[in-house]
Image (spheres, rainbow, N blue to C red):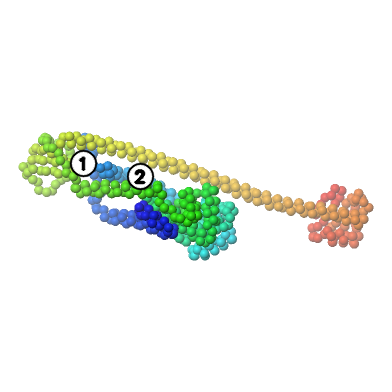
């Protein structure tokens, strides 16, 4: 798979990102489908006695169990590795299951958290931006309903969902970036919606969860994500008609050190390498090729795959009886009936007579010739010593493997404890964040109340200033019309809807009407001054 991906990258250096994306995605889907079909085929073709037949034959050597199948002359390191993997298959599958369970829990939590973001602390945008979103959807020919929400729980624009997609915008983004850059971001996210990238991204996460141990899967998946972003960048540039706005938006997000923590979301800026590749491709209009590290990875992968294939082929040939002949010298050895116990299988065929020689042949056991009373072992004594050394070595290897298994189990338990501790810390941090947000909301509400009271006080003060100015003008008019002899003689006056009184004397109707027309304009207008001036309604 990695080899085909490398061929695709090399052969499509000058092709459009859409073609590269479809080829890489097809290769990824083909791998997932072939794996599923192979699993179903193998599962349906397991014989009933496959489990019992697959177990290695055991006997006792020095009172300890031993697998004679592991004794093979002239074995290569690859064959020993294949046997080691077969003997420790249960441990390997157990470790794989633990890590798989952890990744499944992470994926489920990501889906749950996505729904939580959608339903909590997310608000719709203004009507102007909703109208722009509708216009972009029409230009991109998107028929499904698309929602756009502003959330304080995310740090980058992202798209969730397929049937009812939702575009999340970080709180404050519309105020920090120019409208042209925001429109380029929206065009990029809507391109993900039009291309149904959420489904392919979901398939990638599922395959990565199962084949987390396969570097080729991770590499191919990263290539698909990069080409996906390139395709959406091209669509966004085609809609906005300006490369600079999209590039500036990417740079702005990297300056804010914004990252994406949800692999289920189809996000905007991407990781550091993806960001650099996207900027270079947009500016230079040139696709990336395989670098030296990736070339080395492909070469090593092909070498390992070839060696493992050769090892398993040789192992299968040995299992079919195709074993090189073993020659040895012959020595007469007296064997009693109670020699080292071996596996006994009851034979239902007719028994030979006592004088008939019996030859027991095994690819890995010494040949024994018996006439019913005496027997000869066709073997070489130094060869038997070598077998004993091999048995002891395998015994030590088995004990070492058990110790490693216990150590790995302890490591897994430690990792699980660390995960639980981090989860508790995350919950505590979330509670603290919620408490701070509640306090902030209360402070904002209190601030709004104080602002309203301040506005009321300001209006009242303005009215008082206007009345004070009117009183001063009334005093000036009194002096101009010589209603009193001098300013010192003016002790008090009162101008209401009923009369105009100066120093306790009611003025004529003509004077009253003149002052009333000038200063009385509403039912609440009234002016009084006495001694030190004061205003009373």
Quarter occupied by residue 76: top left
Residue at image mark 2: 95
Residue 214: image location, x then y, percent? 36, 49
Q: Earlier in the sequence, mark 1 or mark 2?
A: 1
Residue at the right extreme of this rendering = 485
Q: Secondary structure at mark 1?
A: loop
For mark 2, give the secondary structure: helix
Residue at the image position 64 percent from the left and 49 percent from the top: 446
Look at the image and tell me whether residue 148 can be seen. Answer: no
**Residue at 33% over, 54% down:** 35
- For this orientation, the residue located farthest to the left is 355
Front tag of 1 and 2: 1
Q: Which residue is mark 1?
A: 73
The answer to whether any part of residue 85 appears in the image is: yes
Residue 428's disc is none
| Label 1, residues with CA under 10 Å away: few <14, some 14-19, many ≥20 | few
Q: Are marks 1 and 2 in contact (CB under 8 Å)?
A: no
Label tally: 2
Question: Which residue is depicted at the point 57% across and 54% down?
Answer: 177
**Which residue is rendered at x = 59% and y = 61% of the image?**
128
Separation of residues labelled 1 and 2 (CA atoms): 32 Å
């Amino acid at each position: 798979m990695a080899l085909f991906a490398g061929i695709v990258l090399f052969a499509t250096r000058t092709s459009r990102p859409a073609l590269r994306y479809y080829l890489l995605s097809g290769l990824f889907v083909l791998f997932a489908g072939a794996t599923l079909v192979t699993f179903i085929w193998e599962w349906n073709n397991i014989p009933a006695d496959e489990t019992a037949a697959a177990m290695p034959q055991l006997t006792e050597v020095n009172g300890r169990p031993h697998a004679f199948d592991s004794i093979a002359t002239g074995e290569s390191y690859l064959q020993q590795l294949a046997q080691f993997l077969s003997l420790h298959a249960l441990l390997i599958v157990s470790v794989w299951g633990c890590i798989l369970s952890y990744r499944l829990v992470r994926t489920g939590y990501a889906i749950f958290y996505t729904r939580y973001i959608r339903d909590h602390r997310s608000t719709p945008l203004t009507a102007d931006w909703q109208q722009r979103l509708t216009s972009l959807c029409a230009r991109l020919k998107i028929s499904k309903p698309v929602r756009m929400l502003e959330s304080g729980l995310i740090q980058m624009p992202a798209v969730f969902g397929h049937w009812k997609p939702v575009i999340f915008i970080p709180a404050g983004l519309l105020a920090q970036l120019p409208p042209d850059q925001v429109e380029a971001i929206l065009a990029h996210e809507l391109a993900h919606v039009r291309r149904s990238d959420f489904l392919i991204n979901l398939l990638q996460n599922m395959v990565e969860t199962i084949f987390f141990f396969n570097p080729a899967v991770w590499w191919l998946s990263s290539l698909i994500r990069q080409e996906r972003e390139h395709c959406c960048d091209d669509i966004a540039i085609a809609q906005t008609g300006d490369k600079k706005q999209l590039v500036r938006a990417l740079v702005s997000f990297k300056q804010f050190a914004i990252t994406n923590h949800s692999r289920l979301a189809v996000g905007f800026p991407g990781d550091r390498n993806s960001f650099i590749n996207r900027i270079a491709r947009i500016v230079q209009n040139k696709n990336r090729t395989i670098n030296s590290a990736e070339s080395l990875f492909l070469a090593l992968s092909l070498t390992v795959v070839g060696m493992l294939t050769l090892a398993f082929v040789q192992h299968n040939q040995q299992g079919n009886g195709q074993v090189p002949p073993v020659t040895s010298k012959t020595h007469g050895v007296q064997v009693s009936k109670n020699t080292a116990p071996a596996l006994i299988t009851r034979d239902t065929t007719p028994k030979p007579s006592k004088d008939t020689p019996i030859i027991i042949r095994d690819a890995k056991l010494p040949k024994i010739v018996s006439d019913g009373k005496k027997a000869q072992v066709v073997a070489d004594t130094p060869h038997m010593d070598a077998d004993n050394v091999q048995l002891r070595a395998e015994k030590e290897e088995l004990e070492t493997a058990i110790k490693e298994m216990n150590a790995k189990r302890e490591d897994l338990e430690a990792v699980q404890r660390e995960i639980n501790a981090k989860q508790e810390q995350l919950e505590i941090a979330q509670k603290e964040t919620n408490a701070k947000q509640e306090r902030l909301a209360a402070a904002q509400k209190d601030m709004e109340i104080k602002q309203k009271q301040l506005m009321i006080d300001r209006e009242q003060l303005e009215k008082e200033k206007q009345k004070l100015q009117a009183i001063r003008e009334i005093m000036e008019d009194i002096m101009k019309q010589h209603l009193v002899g001098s300013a010192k003689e003016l002790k008090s006056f009162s101008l209401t809807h009923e009369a105009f009184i100066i120093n306790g004397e009611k003025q004529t109707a003509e004077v009253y009407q003149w002052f009333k027309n000038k200063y009385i304009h509403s039912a609440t207008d009234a002016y009084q001054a006495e001694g030190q001036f004061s205003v009373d309604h």
